[in-house]
Amino acid sequence: MATLEALLIDLTLRVTDLQQLNAILGDPQTTALITGGLVAFAAALPGTFLLLRKLAMTTDAISHTVLLGIVLAFLLLAALPGLEADLNSPWLIFGAALAGLATVLLTGAIQRSGLVKEDAALGLVFPLLFAIAIILISRLTDDVHLDSDAVILGEIGVVWADARSHCLQDCEPVHITPDDPRAETGRRCTNCAELDIGPRDPAAEFEEYCLNCGRYTTAEAWRARLVPQAPTQVFWPRAITSMLLVALLNLAFILLFYKELKLGTFDPALAAALGLRPALLNTALMVLVSITAVAAFDAVGSVLVVAFFIIPPATAWLLSDRLAHILLLAPLGGVLASFTGYEFSRGNLLGIAQMRDLLQLLDETIGLDGFTEWNTSISAAIVLMMFLFFLLAWVFSPRQGLLLSLLQHRARRQHFAEQLLLGHVHHHQGTAEAASELAQDRLHLHLGWTPRRTQRVLMRLRLRDLVASEDGTLQLTARGERSVRRFMALRGAGGASPAGD
Amino acid sequence: MSLAGGRNWRTVAALLALSLAVIPLSLALGNIRVDYTLVTVAAGGAVLGIVCGVLGSFAVLRQQSLLGDALSHAALPGVALAFLLAGRELGWLLLGAGIASWLGVLLINSLVRRTRLKQDAAMGVVLAAFFALGITLLTYIQSRNDASQAGLDQFIFGQAAAIRRQDVVLISALGLAAFLVLIALWKEFKLITFDPAFAQANGFPLRLLDVTLSTLIVIAIVLGLQLAGVVLMVGLLIAPAVAARQWTRQLDQMLVLAGIFGGLAGAGGAIFSGLQQGLPTGPLIIVVAVAIVALSIALAPERGLLWRAWRQRRDRQRFAAQQVLQDIHRHATQHQDPRYPAPGGMLVALRGPLARPALRQLQREGLLQAGADDDWTLSERGLERAQAAARNQLLWERYRQFGEELGLPAVTVDPQQPIDRLLPAAALARLETLD
């Protein structure tokens, strides 16, 4: 990890200078943005395949059970001698991946017994594992920072605080010896304790000793003013490295196994017949989900991480039905939602409105006792943004949007009404009852419509020169006649009237 | 049918008695002091467990188990809004939770109906989005710094210990109302659970009934939230039902059993959490409920794993015995003496390690006689049995070969079945005389 970070720092320093880098990394806002974007990117990739495989709820289950893996690995580390129990240990990620795998395998085993259906099996396994984890956590001592609130919610805003320092320049550790000019010396009584006398006693003997001798790391030496120059340091947030690693891992997996994943998703039987081992690939996908969920834990918490897996791919799926497009759109949408969501958590709703003004409005209308301070969890705000994008995609989708189907429905209704009216005129014109059936002001009675609707339909037909009126009686124009004939030929209706009256 | 039903009801009664016995037993064994709080909490746990168990059965049978997970998360914004508008009063919080979950159901349903998203994705989207909204509202409430907000996060993890006596009364009343609706619409719910297509074809208002049933499930979730919390709610909803399903095939018995198991888990978990300071109630309830599922899966008659393993073993032994008997008979026939003894070693070599227990069993049944030197001879009855089996086998063989040609009635070929019972006498006579 540390070497990777050093490499990253080296790379970033080629495009920017040190001051800027430290300003970026030390700023809660930019680190939260970077981390949120990375989580969204990393989660959307495996999320897409899970969504298409109808395993969306499995991500929910896994994101809960990895907690048990973390707790068990933590307890194991604490019990083993020589290993330090540390919440940043990579062993925890290992434990979490195992727990995610265990969830999937256990669910599969229960399901294969034939006694419990798949959904119920999942619904049994993950509450059980999560419950055990919560019970174990409640047994842990208080000095362990692993409370269940933090796990459920996470807080992306404090990611910057958990950083590893990297020293770039003036990094020599300082070793002060008694001969060093920087050494400070003092005197102490050597026989006072022995003789039970005070230091002022004439019998007291003294020796000189060094006050500040010893080894100092660079940072300590700077703090103790032992070195004239501050070491050049970069504080690199750990979450960024781990999320970046996970994002790269997911990306590499999907690029490498794109063909296999695609076939395994849409035609598992064929994939199996071709020897592509779809079951193995599925397991690998679950491991990736577990690892992503764990890495994202600190940032977004165990419940909301589900949104990062599911909502952006679902949004992309509403917009396109090509796998490659979904795989491009989903991470992009997720990253966009992270950025706008971060702004939203600070009160800026997509640049359209300020939450403070909205709350003030609410305060004036329904009364909030004057609490108009907008303050929310960043990850929740990101998820809400994702949901907003999802709703927008649902309404405006060019393929299956609500708006589109509404317009289509309307167009069909209008078309049908027009045909009905034309048919009615066609049926009755030139007959004895034409005067009563086709009187313009009585037409709505025959069609069973309201007068306004009849007027609207007539207006549209007149504009298109399909119908004309003569002394208040309707007649088809030549164009109208053609239109009716075409319609009837299309329906194969022959001479039968479409408007029975 | 009625006989089987009667036996199953006896199973239900026995399990009820067992469950009732477990609670005082665990109190005695755990050396738990019974006080007013414990009684209230255990009673609340039991009532909630019963309601969730009974109503959750429908979620399990309709393969919507995870709906419980989605809806329990979806309840959170409702809880927070109700708190904002009406303060910390259980009735209002439940109403808010109910409305939010109910909106969640409608959104899931319309997503499934109107987009290409499947049920799982729709549930995932609603779960995460509603939960995020809830968190947003909760952080807003926390920023107001009301002293009374304490305890709101109990809705996330559940806090049975906070249940008061009037809460138990309210929960019982709501649960009772849900049960009354269930009884009134019993036939309809049964139909849309097991054969929705048939229900629709017969003019039942499918969507209305669907929403009504979902509403009942929402009620169960909303009530159970206080006990198990948002995350674990799904376990409380489905574990009792899954356990009950193992013991019976009838809906009414399953609901009663699920109620019993749910009550046991709710009360049991509440009692266990009294064992030690700081033990969380919700997770303990889930552990008890899943333990009941594990026991049921292992022990349930006819379906359970133990029962299945035992039956498989019995079948295998029976088959081996039959084979060994025929082997001895064939051996004797080859030597043209029906009493010609067969060496045990040969039989083991032929049929594997199951041959020894098979020989002992056949001896017990009086079909074989053991000779001095691990030799086995057919007894009178053994000879009859072996001859009958050989004839059965031969007739099956002939039927398989010539049955169609002779125009005999079509039956499934199964040499383990006595052919006499499956074919009419005339057909058997044709097969016998065939040569």
Image (tube, coloured by chain):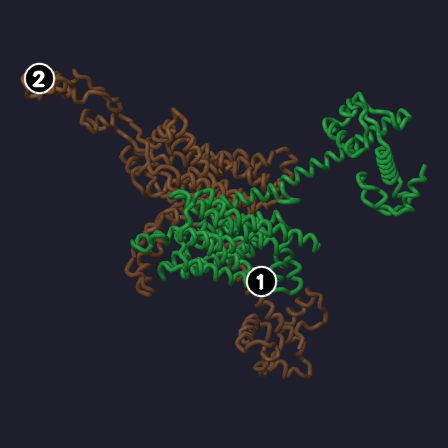
Chain colours: A brown, B green
Is residue B36 or residue A341 the one in the foreground? B36
Instruction: Give the quadrant of residue B197.
Output: bottom right
Numbered disc 1: secondary structure: helix
Question: How far across and how far down the image is residue B236, in percent?
Answer: 50, 49
Report the side of A48 relative to A167 (left or right).
Answer: right
Q: Label 2, label 1: how many angstroms apart (C-alpha)?
A: 98 Å
Instruction: Give the quadrant of residue A187.
Output: top left
Q: Which residue is mark 2?
A: A204
Report the side of B253 relative to B329 (left or right).
Answer: left
Q: Compared with residue A433, is residue B193 higher up or lower down, i.e. above or below?
A: above
Q: Is residue B74 shown to the viewer in this render?
A: no
> The N terminus of chain A is located in which quarter?
top left
Q: Is residue A422 shown to the viewer in this render?
A: yes
Which amino acid lies under the numbered mark 2 shown in the image of this protein? Ala
Report the side of B320 relative to B107 (left or right).
Answer: right
Q: Are marks 2 and 1 in contact (CB under 8 Å)?
A: no
Q: Which residue is mark 1?
A: B183
Numbered disc 2: secondary structure: loop
Task: Specify the subunit that label 2 lies on.
Answer: A
Which amino acid lies under the numbered mark 1 shown in the image of this protein? Ile
Question: How far across and how far down the image is residue A114, in percent?
Answer: 63, 43
Residue neighbourhood size for the residue with mark 2, other residues' Cα within 10 Å, grouped as few (<14), some (14–19), many (≥20): some
Looking at the image, the residue that sits furthest to the left is A202
The residue drawn where x is 58% and y is 49% is B15
Residue neighbourhood size for the residue with mark 1, other residues' Cα within 10 Å, grouped as few (<14), some (14–19), many (≥20): few
Task: Specify the subunit that label 1 lies on.
Answer: B
Q: Compared with residue B292, is residue B358 higher up or lower down, i.e. above or below?
A: above
Question: How far across and how far down the image is residue A81, in percent?
Answer: 39, 25
